[in-house]
Image: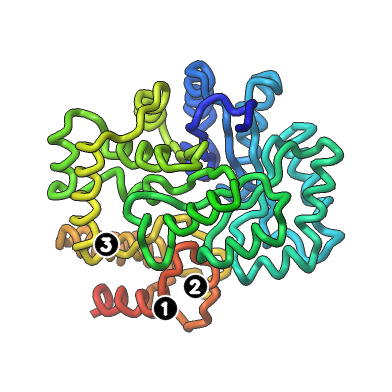
């Protein structure tokens, strides 16, 4: 499919090991070494990841330490970094410079939806990306996507030159009417577009399962909860790559253990996944993946994902710890849920299509009694 990609696990560089707002290079170096030594070579970043630190860390820990043919590097054109046609190419060139490479193997129009797609169209972003491919500065042009399947179908129809699509897919979202993972996958297959999966463990929500959900996986053996989620995604028709955002060596080693010699889920494992999914959907959990796209434009600087995490903890475990984190950690300097002015910027940026304004009212009711 893409001969330069050696295996079907990609290193998503949005959740790297951090210390003091900077990537912890010693651990990141070790993670990169283990990843490459075990035959994997796909690295995914974007300029906004970790406030710009992701691209810099990849330059220092990957590009400077390995020959170019050893890795496949994917980057993205995000809508917050261009407002006109003339902005696109200079931004792209700045990304090449920061990463220290002459070309990107994969370049994506980032987080496409029906709203920002208009901006990409107006600025001829797709056309410029295809030109960059002709010039050899990009090998493959694709999109990452966060919207309904009909919007995806329209984009792929208008731009058949798109070579691949990156979608959110995990066993909880698979038939979710908002995320529409299965329906988006079917659209990709209809257009014969290879698929990259993001959020296979739903921002970590499918890693640390509650005991009533995890018991179904425990009955299968000693494999991690994450392994079933990632293998579920990797086994879907048309999927050639699953991205995992790894934050430490333990996560790296776990992913290598079940993806180095990948096998799709068998019938018994699939039944367990369905049982776990049923348990999770029976809980009153906010389906936030902590991507933090919502926080960038918040005029009240509300740390929305952290407040939602507090709410989820309270709903699942019913303990005082969530109250402590809400009051003394996440809102001590301001930004309580009740500060929301209802502008809706967060909702337009949310890949999960959450009703954030309503949910913040629920959070305020729970924690600001």
> Which residue does the image show at 74% across and 43% down from the upper left?
95
Instruction: Report the residue marked by disc 2.
Output: 347
> Which residue does the image show at 67% across and 54% down from the upper left?
109
| Label 2 crowd (10 A; few <14 / some 14-19 / many >=20) | some
Residue that sits furthest to the front in the current view: 190
Instruction: Report the residue marked by disc 3.
Output: 312
| Label 1 crowd (10 A; few <14 / some 14-19 / many >=20) | some
**For this view, does 36 lie left or right of residue 262?**
right
**For this view, does 19 lie left or right of residue 215?**
right
Judging depth in this view, the residue of 261 and 294 nearest the camera is: 261
Label disc, if present, on residue 33 of the rendered structure: none
> Which residue does the image show at 64% across and 20% down from the upper left?
70
Give the number of the mark in front: 2 or 3.
2
Total numbered labels placed on residues in the image: 3
**For this view, does 342 lie left or right of residue 92?**
left
Identify the element where label 1 is drawn.
helix
Q: Do the CB atoms of the residues marked 2 and 3 lie less than 8 Å apart?
A: no
| Label 3 crowd (10 A; few <14 / some 14-19 / many >=20) | many
The image shows residue 342 at horizontal and vertical percentages of: 47, 83
Identify the element where label 3 is drawn.
helix
């Amino acid at each position: 499919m893409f001969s330069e990609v050696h295996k079907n696990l990609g290193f998503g560089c949005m959740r790297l090991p951090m210390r003091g707002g900077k990537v912890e290079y010693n651990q990141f170096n070790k993670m990169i070494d283990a990843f490459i030594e075990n035959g994997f070579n796909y690295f995914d970043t974007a300029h906004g990841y970790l406030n710009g630190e992701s691209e810099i860390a990849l330059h220092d820990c990957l590009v400077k330490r390995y020959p170019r043919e050893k890795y496949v590097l994917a980057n993205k054109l995000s809508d917050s970094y261009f407002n006109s046609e003339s902005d696109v190419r200079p931004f792209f060139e700045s990304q090449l410079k920061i990463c220290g490479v002459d070309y990107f193997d994969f370049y994506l129009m980032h987080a496409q939806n029906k709203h920002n797609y208009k901006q990409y169209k107006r600025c001829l972003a797709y056309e410029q990306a295809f030109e960059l491919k002709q010039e050899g500065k990009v090998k493959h042009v694709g999109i990452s996507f966060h919207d309904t399947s009909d919007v995806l179908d329209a984009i792929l129809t208008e731009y058949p030159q798109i070579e691949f699509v990156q979608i959110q897919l995990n066993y909880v979202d698979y038939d979710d009417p908002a995320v529409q993972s299965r329906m988006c996958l079917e659209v990709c297959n209809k257009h014969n577009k290879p698929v990259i999966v993001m959020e296979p463990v739903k921002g970590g929500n499918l890693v640390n399962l509650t005991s009533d959900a995890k018991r179904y996986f425990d009955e299968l053996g000693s494999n991690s909860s994450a392994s079933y989620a990632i293998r579920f995604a990797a086994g879907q028709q048309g999927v050639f790559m699953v991205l995992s955002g790894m934050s430490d060596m333990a996560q790296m080693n776990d992913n290598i253990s079940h993806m180095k010699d990948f096998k799709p889920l068998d019938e018994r494992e699939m039944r367990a996944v369905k049982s776990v999914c049923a348990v999770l959907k029976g809980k009153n959990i906010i389906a936030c993946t902590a991507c933090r796209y919502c926080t960038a434009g918040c005029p009240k600087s509300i740390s929305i994902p952290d407040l939602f995490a507090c709410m989820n903890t309270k709903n699942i475990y019913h303990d005082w710890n969530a109250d402590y984190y809400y009051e003394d950690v996440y809102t001590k300097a301001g930004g309580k849920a009740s500060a929301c002015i209802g502008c809706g910027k967060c909702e337009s940026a949310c890949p999960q299509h959450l009703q954030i304004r309503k949910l913040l009212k629920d959070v305020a009711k729970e924690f600001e009694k």
